Image: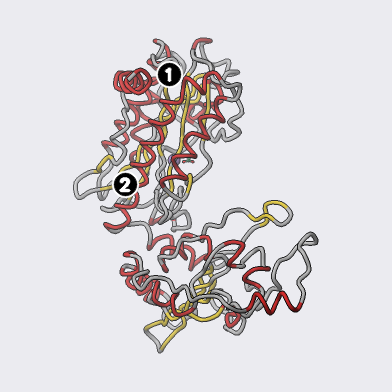
């Protein structure tokens, strides 16, 4: 996982050669531009306790948690960088300039570790990289902290990334299953600051959904209305936070029967529904994950309402099953009992028993939510999917019905309808608090909300 100690500055064939005189000229006459004294973010006060909990699980072992590397998107253009969630959680560092950095917990005696952060510091003006290096140079991608500033920012001992090449091997979070699993489990219960960040993500997401509803007349007129919607939500996500926490699903009509429809290249039809599954990721990298299924005309047809009401009843049953000590799978089972019963009453199933209802629901009804969309995914089965809920966990409840357009087990009027309702909740001492209650859930409330936003 180690990167070459000192990669040459990235330049391209069309970059102009540099004369010795120019190089000398560029090396001088720059004013000092120190970062402000108070650059330590609030989260830096929380990270020592997080690292201490990790340290206690691996006494005497060297632990390596890389931020990750830049990935080429095309030729010399990289994807936007987002640090690995475990790195962000342990350091509080979330910016694009973290690419290539590595946190090492160095064992100090049998019972503790010293954290050392290996960083690529700001290049001195005596080194041409600051104006020549397209990938990391300050005049190409922006200022980065020098070592002293990085220490002030993080409260960690910082060392140059070049020196990371001399660090002996250790357990690496990117390829050590046990370390990855412990890191996932340590993140299962959110602290108050994390719940606050998730609420912020949810609130920005609610604003993005309102933007989309206001933009529906314009989107309906566009030949790729789904893309228009993706763009409108993306504007809110990028303006308020780091961006979207995952690719927006803007699925009109039967596209909603494709669980992760992210092609978003279809038109909108006012007689159909729009399934919008989207989340804003905060600058601190916590993401919301909300789905609403909306009638594009502003009014549900009776058959759309019938399907919607069943999914809503399933979601209500799932939410009612959330409490500390309940098994994680209980809320899914509660939601599925309602769905199977409803499908039986419609005559689609002969009986609610067994698992035939899964033809129409396809996936689980929710997941942990946090720095990752599907958070804590490396946790052991006994502490997450087969475990019990704990106060402070944040999760989604998102049952759906996906009635495929070519499904001959279904009456014609139901075919091509896809409905998911997804909310974000935090488990409390005696139940769960709905974090996404700013967005309407019932058909009547959705119609009133859409009417007010479009006509109001
Ligand atoms: N909302 C996307 C997902 O949960 O997979
Ligand atoms: Mn989800």
Q: Alpha-carbon neighbours of circle 1 within 10 Å: few (<14), some, or many (≥20)?
A: many
- Residue 214: x %, y % from top left: 41, 25
Q: Toward the viewer: 114 or 204?
A: 204
Q: Alpha-carbon neighbours of circle 2 within 10 Å: few (<14), some, or many (≥20)?
A: many
Read off the residue under disc 2: 199
Q: Toward the viewer: 25 or 130?
A: 25
The residue located at (58%, 80%) in the rendering is: 164
The residue located at (28%, 42%) in the rendering is: 322
The image's colouring method is secondary structure
Which of disc 2 and disc 1 is earlier in sequence?
2
Residue 229 higher or lower than 308, as above or below: below
The quarter of the image holding the C terminus is top left
Residue 176 higher or lower than 277, as above or below: below
Residue most toward the left? 430
- Residue 64: x %, y % from top left: 52, 74
Q: Is residue 147 left or right of 444 when viewed as pictured?
A: right
The quarter of the image holding the N terminus is bottom right
- Residue 269: x %, y % from top left: 53, 16
Read off the residue under disc 1: 295
């Amino acid at each position: 996982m180690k990167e070459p100690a000192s990669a040459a500055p990235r330049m391209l064939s069309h970059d102009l050669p540099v004369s010795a005189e120019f190089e000398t000229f560029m090396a001088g006459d720059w004013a000092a531009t120190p970062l402000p004294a108070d650059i330590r973010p609030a989260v830096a006060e929380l990270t020592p306790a997080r690292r201490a909990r990790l340290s206690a699980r691996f006494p005497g072992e060297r632990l390596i948690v890389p931020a990750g590397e830049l990935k080429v998107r095309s030729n010399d253009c990289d994807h936007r960088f987002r640090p690995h969630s475990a790195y962000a959680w342990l350091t509080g560092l979330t910016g694009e300039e973290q690419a290539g950095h590595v946190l090492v917990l160095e064992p100090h005696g049998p019972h503790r570790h010293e954290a050392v952060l290996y960083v690529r510091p700001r290049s001195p003006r005596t080194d041409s990289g600051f104006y020549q290096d397209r990938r990391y140079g300050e005049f190409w991608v922006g200022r980065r902290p020098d070592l002293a500033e990085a220490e002030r920012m993080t409260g960690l001992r910082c060392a140059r990334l070049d020196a990371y090449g001399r660090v002996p091997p250790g357990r690496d979070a990117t390829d050590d299953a046990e370390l990855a699993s412990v890191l996932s489990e340590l993140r299962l219960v959110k602290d108050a600051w994390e719940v606050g960040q998730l609420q912020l993500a949810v609130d920005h997401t609610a604003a993005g959904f309102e933007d989309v509803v206001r933009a529906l007349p314009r989107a309906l007129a566009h030949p790729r209305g789904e893309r228009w919607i993706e763009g409108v939500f993306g504007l809110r996500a990028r303006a308020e936070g780091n961006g979207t926490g995952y690719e927006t699903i803007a699925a009109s009509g039967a596209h909603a029967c494709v669980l992760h429809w992210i092609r978003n290249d279809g038109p909108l039809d006012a007689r159909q529904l729009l399934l919008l599954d989207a989340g804003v990721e905060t600058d601190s990298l916590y993401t919301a994950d909300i789905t609403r299924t909306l009638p594009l005309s502003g009014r549900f047809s009776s058959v759309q309402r019938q399907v919607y009401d069943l999914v809503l009843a399933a979601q209500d049953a799932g939410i009612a099953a959330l409490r500390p000590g309940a098994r994680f799978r209980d809320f899914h089972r509660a939601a599925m009992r309602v769905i199977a019963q409803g499908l039986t009453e419609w005559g689609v199933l002969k009986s609610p028993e067994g698992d035939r209802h899964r033809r129409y629901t396809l996936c689980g009804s929710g997941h942990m939510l946090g720095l990752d969309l599907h958070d804590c995914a490396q946790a052991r089965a006994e502490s997450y999917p087969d475990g019990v809920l704990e106060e402070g966990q944040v999760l989604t409840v998102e049952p759906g019905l996906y009635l495929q357009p070519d499904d001959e087990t279904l009456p014609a009027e139901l075919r091509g309808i896809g409905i998911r309702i997804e909310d974000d909740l935090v488990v409390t001492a005696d139940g769960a608090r709905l974090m996404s209650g700013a967005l309407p859930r019932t058909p009547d409330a959705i119609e009133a909300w859409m009417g007010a936003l479009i006509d109001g």
